[in-house]
Image: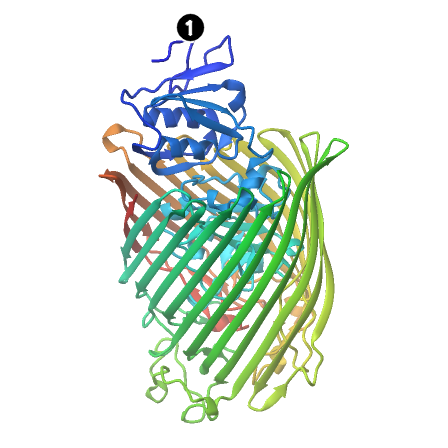
Amino acid sequence: MVHSDRPVRKPGHRGKALPKPSALALIFALAGRDALAGADRFDFDLPAQPLSAALDSVADTSGIKLMYADAAVQGLKTQAVRGRMTADEALKRVLARNGLRHEWVDKTLVAVKEDPQAPKDASVALDLVSVTDSAEDENPGYAAIRTSTATKTDTPIMETPVSIQTVTRQVMEDQQVVRVEDAIKNVSGVQKNFGFGDLRENFTIRGFTADAQIYRNGVRLGRTTFETAHLQQIEVLKGPSSVLYGRIQPGGMVNLVTKQPLDQPYYALQQQFGSYDFYRTTIDATGPLTDGLNYRVNLAYLNSDSFRDFVDQERVFFAPSISWKFGERTTFNLALEYTHENSVIDSGIVALGDRPAKVKRSQFMGDRGDFTQHDGILLDFNWSHAFNDDWALKHTFIYDDRDYRESYRPVVDFGNDEYHRGLWQVENPRRTYATSLDLNGKFETFGVKHNLLLGGDYYRRQELGEGCAGPGQSGNCLPWPPGMDGFDPFNPRGNPAFNFNTHRFPSRRSFNYDTASLEEWYGLYFQDQITLFDQLHILGGGRYDWIHQKNTNRWNHLLFTQNQFDALETQFFSPRVGILYRPFEWLSLYGNFVESIGSNLGRSFSGEILTPETGTQYEIGTKTEFWDGRLIASLAYYHLTKENIQAVDVANSANSTFYKTQGQARSQGIELDVAGRITEDLSVIGTYAFTDARIKRDNQFPDNEGNRLPNVPENSGSLWVKYDLPFEFVKGLSLGTGAYVAGQREGDNENSFQLPGYVRWDAMAAYRFNVGPTRLTAQVNVTNILDKTYFKATNMLDGAPRAGITVGEPLTVLGSLRLEY
């Protein structure tokens, strides 16, 4: 026992701190048995909180005594620490990024001291040099207080003058997120957009489609669906983001942040099972191989039917990665992702009149043989080197290789509620290369603090497509009878002559369609985060792009090539300016102005490539942080304009799909996001968005001016609450419930039909308990408890919204068993 002649604060004490005549505090454990560093292991589940409270919890759980100076921990915070580990390991994680270290005085007494070897800003150094520290055990609960997506630097959200929202791993686990869209519903102003069932991840952000472009660790990938088993969190940056990421749609970006190798062992096995023969197995294993060399392996296998007739899905996903710390300041990371997937392209149902057709939710409009095959390999290599405590260099290279083989019978809209069958049987390989180099440094000039970023990147994406396609009849692709098939949405496979197995892929010599597109750019960017008086934060930056793109399109021997028409060569400067004032620790006020260049890649009927879309945004907002970062909230107003909008050229797209730029659209609105813990046991994540998105100018169809943009509800929101029951007799039991609301949405630019609004109610229950040295979690989630019929989005990707309406899932149940060690 350590004697003291002054008052002490014991672990678990929640009252007002007792006065102390000296800065030295002695914290005693309540447990009686000894704990030796590196020996016994304990289950830690610590939220993000003040450092002093985290130290209390470590002592209380492990039975050690801690000695530290109050001044050394005052004002410091720690990220969440979760997992089974020794007291020594827990202290390392609690003290990480705070410039402190611990020493074992004896078997039960530990002294916490300042670390003279720690960098001046440990958070930045660790983020740039040792990404293995951002890991599974550092789960921030529902609230993330730092992000790198908005600035490419490790900056607190409260000091970032843009709107950035994060869906943490804890939220994904509580809601049993399987698809990215299952997580995105927790972010204001973001709606699921049309994606051919589960073929593509596509979203509407601040009124504008993201064009099915998703980012992985800051690098744009092609249109596809993504596995979530290896994701640490999902970050959504609102508004134009070209200044750091190149060509992008102005509504914002969705960035998938992957898990990284840990320097401590962690293993997890999860088996999920649910409605419609849903089965999914995931494995997560990480730890050290040798000193300085860590690994991680994520594996997922999914096999599922669907509430939609003839629709199923099978996926194999394998993602190994290693991290090698070479010396104290250099780190190399290598990751591989392999995906093999078989699924069915699902175009949903059609519209009749001004509403979706009143058919069964299960009614599949395609044929029994419709399918898509997807094989993908992604290689990610990056390294970083810190020259000193203030300056660091980071380089990233990504290679993404995906092959698609698609065959299905799309529904073709002939107007006046008349529909027929088309044909799409295409082989579609896609190759993406991307690399970037960033130099980040901190310095002061005349008392003004700077966080400078200088960088450059190169992006190249090539996509090919060849096969058979056509409206109604096949040409020379398949021996169909000529004419139309008399499609009936209430009996879509009622014409026997056209009920054939599309698994029979045509031979190459019969192909009547081929296309090729190439998009590449070089970009140079700069950014300076200036801090004045520790309360005023100014963000300034810009980017210059050199853009090259071209495509060819041949349809029934009608040829458009880059030999006949020049490829697009353009240059663009994207500025960004933001200012944030933080008068109190809990309050920030900010505003920003941003411009961007879009990612459209279409060709007009006459052969020219379209002028890229551009976006301009003005935004003001406020951010709050309560209870030492346990609960965060943001409120924003924005005004966003999009020019040179790409749309299908209806007058000239009878034999193929051609595009034209048709005018201008404007979106403005208010967004509210709240996430974190209200108490130690009550977690919440909630949103609200008012979005007024309208067509302001339409050169092709002037009558559309003033109409609302499709798939954008004027009012939408969500609220999810989880309660960890604190009572001893039900310790380990968690209950959660939430509702997701979207108002009526327009189905097309003409506003000729609407998707009705909906309210969806979900719930969960989970029980965690120890089984020997492991922790077992049994969990069940119920989606759409009231079994309401609702619709997610219409098909604006191909300009056929009335022929493609995505149906929402009915009542579904998903159970899981998760074993962690």
Q: Position of residue 23 (x, y in %)?
A: 51, 14
Colour pattern: rainbow
Within the image, what quadrant is residue 179 found in?
A: bottom left
Q: In this view, does 363 lie to the left or right of 259?
A: left
Q: In this view, does 426 lie to the left or right of 317?
A: right
Amino acid on which disc 1 is placed: Asp
Q: Where is residue 553 in the image (x, y as percent from the top left)?
A: 59, 82
**Residue underneath mark 1:** 5
Q: Is residue 68 above or below residue 143?
A: above
Q: In which quarter of the image is the N terminus?
A: top left
Q: Position of residue 218 (x, y in %)?
A: 56, 55
Residue for point 30% across, 51% down: 270
Q: Quadrant of the C terminus?
A: top left
Q: Is residue 343 visible?
A: yes
Residue for point 58% across, 67% down: 749
Q: In this view, does 537 lie above or below 745?
A: above
Q: Position of residue 54 (x, y in %)?
A: 43, 28
Residue for point 41% across, 57% down: 320
Question: Which residue is outermost to the right?
Answer: 446
Q: In this view, does 178 lie to the left or right of 250?
A: left
Q: In this view, does 446 lie above or below 716?
A: above
